[in-house]
Structure formats: C-alpha cells, structure tokens
C-alpha cells in the first residue's frame, strides 16, 4: 500500500464556493481516495467505476473485500445508470427522502464492477444531503463509492479528526467539514427483490419509510438483541464485529434506578480488582455513578443528541484506556432503534437484564 503525507483541507461552511474541493475532485478522478463529510458520518470515497480505487478503499480501511460499498451520486436519475430493473416505488422513496440519509439497494448494471459491490449482483446507492458531499461528487464527475471513513471494526467517524486517527498515512486527503449533523450511518433499504427489507436502521425510521413502501419489514437480524444463531444478515457488513471499543462493553437493560444501582455494584467489583472502569451514561444519570470515567451521550429525551455523540463517545473509551465500560439501553420506536442497533453490535450482544 502507498504511504501518504495525509493533508487536511478545512472548509468554512458559511463561506463555501466549491472551489475548495477542486483538489479532492481531481484526486477522485485520478483513482485516489478522499475522506469527506456527509450528513450521517464521514465517508472514504473513491471512483465507484474503478476496481483499483475500490481495492484501495478495502486496503486503507483493512476491510474484508466481500463487504460491499455504497455508491454516492449527485442526481436522482443516476440510479437508473448504475442500477437496473429499478422498481417504481424507488422513485417514491427518492422523492420523499433524497437528498438524505437513506441508502437504496437495487440490482446493479454492468458498469458497476464487482469489486465495488463485494461480488454481489446488487448495488447500494445514496444521494447525500450534505452540501460538501454533493459538491464533491458533482465536481469529481464520478460516482463515489464510500464506506464510512473509519478503520474496519472501529466506530464510524463523525469528525475529520477521527478520520485522521484511523487513516493518516493511508490516504492523500481529508476534507474537514466539521462535526456531522446526524452521527449514525444511513438507513439501508433493499429494493432489489419483491420483499422490501430494511437492512440497517438509521435516522429515517421504518414508519417513515412505510409511507412510501407500506410492506417494508426489518431484516430480523438487525433488530435482534440476542445473538441470532441461525440467521444470516443480508447486509454483509452487519455480520462483522463493529463499533467495539477495546475495553469490554456491557449494556444493562431494565428500569433506570435498577440499572444505575446494578452498574454501581459492577463498578465496585471491577475497581477492587484494580480495573479502569467507565460508564456510558446520560445527562439524567451521570451524577449517580461512581466510576473513574463517566461519559454522557446527552439528554435521554433528545434522541438526536444521543445519536450525534454515540460514536465519538465509544471512541473516547479507547483514549481513556477503559478496561470495562458499563452502559445503559436506548430503546424507542424512533431513531432509538438505530442507536440500539449500533450499541448491540458494539457490545457483541453483551446485554444483561436487571
Ligand atoms: O451513511 C452512510 O451510509 C455512510 C456514508 C459515508 O454514506 N456509509 C456507510 O457505508 O455507512 P459502510 O460501507 O460503512 O456501510 C455500508 C453497509 C455495509 O453493512 C454493507 O454490507 C451494506 O451497507 N451494503 C452495501 N452494499 C450492499 C448490497 N449491495 N447488499 C447488501 N448490503 C450492502
Ligand atoms: Mg461502516
């Protein structure tokens, strides 16, 4: 793998004319990689039609090459060029949710190389709403294959600094557009068969999607909170260990007061054993814990705040050298489902009922 002196270009969103992205656009056209902000998380972009660029993406992330990439476009009509047999309901989805945090899987056309789709005959497509992302795709003149811009297995990146942590030396350029708006990856819906399935929950909820696609269901694997022994996730990426901090993360589920006292009991035991212990808490609960480190995700009543901070807080436990992390649950019918999906993966189904 080439070694780069990774450059960072900081964008001032209040005074942005697009020309700041010319170098990034040129790199993408030349088969090189660029990390850039989207409204969900930062992406690690490369030319989606160039198999060599896709290989570079897998290599920079240390990602298994059977895990397909999302292709980012700037015009809705492009889905008909990179996809085929696109069902009519996809047009409704695009009109309702694009540009925005929804990824749509359709059958792929021949111009998309297998390297980009991890060998699959389908392609995941997204039209991001972040203006830097949109301008970059337009200026590059290519379709931009982009997974989240983190090292494989680590939490997705919500700031340019996180991209630098994971990818410095491995890519030539990071576009710094500040912290992202949403903080969780896009909702993924598979429209490539006659059974519409949500393969990954996100900011756009299943109830919202059902207004466009009434018969849409969750892939059962993505909402399971116990290890699904016999089920195979339809999104290859959902099968890998993901988001996990280096320390052991355990999530406690139950009535809030009981969760707090149980976590404090566990903290006492670990501290006696000389371990560094951290807690994943909320503004409402943080003062009740007696741990070395207490990290609040925000107010429990504000799901968007929790979502925005989740990956950053998971990353911070590594810096703190936490050996054990005890966390609370975040179920709710809205984006709480997406938050919990990421947490369940981060703890490897290590959930204790109290
Ligand atoms: O918000 C997002 O979606 C971000 C930003 C950068 O756009 N991207 C992102 O990409 O999260 P990534 O590669 O980290 O996650 C993509 C997920 C993986 O779990 C992958 O397996 C799944 O989408 N996926 C991609 N193409 C697929 C396909 N053709 N069939 C099934 N799953 C697919
Ligand atoms: Mg990812």
Image (cartoon, rainbow, N blue to C red):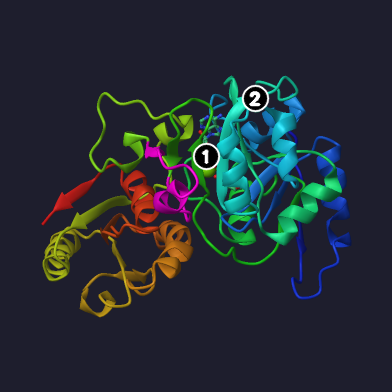
Dot 1 beta carbon under 8 Å from ligand 2? yes
Q: Which residues are magenta?
A: 201-218
Relative image position of residue 242 (x, y in whole percent): 43, 42
The response on whether ligand 1 sits within 8 Å of label 2 is yes
- Determine the residue positioned at 76% across, 38% down: 143
User: How many marks are shown on the rendered structure?
Assistant: 2
Which numbered mark, 1 or 2, is in the foreground of this view? 2
Which numbered marker is on residue 342? none
Q: Left or right? Give the position of 298 relative to 59.
A: left
Helix, strand or loop status at disc 2 = strand
Q: Nearer the viewer, residue 156 or 198?
A: 198
Vertical placement of 271 versus 150: above or below? below
Q: Quadrant of the C terminus?
A: bottom left
The residue that mark 2 highlights is 108
Place residue 219 in its image quadrant.
Answer: top left
Q: Provide residue 212's location: percent of width, then percent of height.
A: 50, 46
As measured in the structure, the alpha-carbon distance from the residue carrying label 1 to the one carrying label 2 is 25 Å
In this orientation, which residue lies closer to the viewer: 291 or 240? 240
Image location (x, y in percent) of residue 113: 70, 22
In percent of width and height, residue 5 lies at 77, 49
**Residue under label 1:** 152
- Magenta region, mostly helix, strand or loop? loop
Residue 180 visible in the picture: yes
């Amino acid at each position: 793998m080439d070694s780069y002196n990774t450059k960072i270009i900081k964008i001032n969103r209040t005074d942005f004319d697009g020309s700041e992205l010319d170098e990034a656009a040129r790199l993408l056209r030349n088969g090189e990689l660029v990390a850039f902000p989207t409204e969900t998380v930062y992406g690690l972009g490369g030319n989606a039609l160039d198999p060599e660029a896709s290989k570079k993406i897998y290599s920079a992330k240390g990602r298994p090459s059977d895990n397909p990439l999302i292709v980012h476009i700037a015009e809705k009509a492009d889905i008909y060029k990179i996809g085929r047999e696109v069902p009519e309901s996809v047009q409704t989805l695009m009109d309702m949710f694009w540009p925005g945090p929804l990824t749509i899987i359709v059958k792929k056309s021949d111009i998309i190389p297998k390297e980009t789709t991890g060998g699959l005959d389908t392609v995941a497509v997204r039209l991001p709403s972040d203006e830097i992302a949109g301008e970059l795709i337009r200026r590059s003149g290519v379709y931009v294959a982009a997974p989240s811009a983190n090292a494989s297995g680590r939490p997705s990146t919500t700031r340019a600094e996180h991209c630098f942590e994971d990818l410095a030396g491995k890519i030539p350029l990071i576009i710094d557009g500040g912290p992202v708006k949403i903080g969780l990856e896009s909702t993924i819906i598979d429209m490539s068969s006659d059974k519409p399935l949500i393969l990954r929950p996100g900011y756009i909820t299943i109830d919202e999607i059902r207004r466009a696609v009434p018969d849409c269901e969750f892939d059962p694997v993505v909402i399971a909170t116990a290890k699904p022994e016999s089920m195979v996730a339809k999104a290859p990426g959902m099968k890998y260990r993901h988001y996990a901090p280096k320390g052991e993360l355990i999530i406690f589920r139950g009535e809030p007061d009981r969760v707090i006292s149980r976590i404090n009991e566990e903290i006492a035991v670990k501290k006696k054993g000389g371990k560094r212990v951290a807690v994943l808490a909320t503004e409402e609960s943080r003062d009740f814990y007696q741990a070395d480190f207490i990290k609040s995700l925000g107010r429990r009543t504000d799901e968007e705040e929790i979502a925005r901070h989740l990956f950053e807080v998971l990353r911070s436990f590594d810096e703190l050298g936490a050996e054990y992390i005890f966390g609370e649950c975040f179920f709710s019918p809205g984006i709480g489902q997406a938050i919990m999906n990421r947490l369940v993966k981060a703890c490897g189904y290590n959930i204790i009922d109290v």
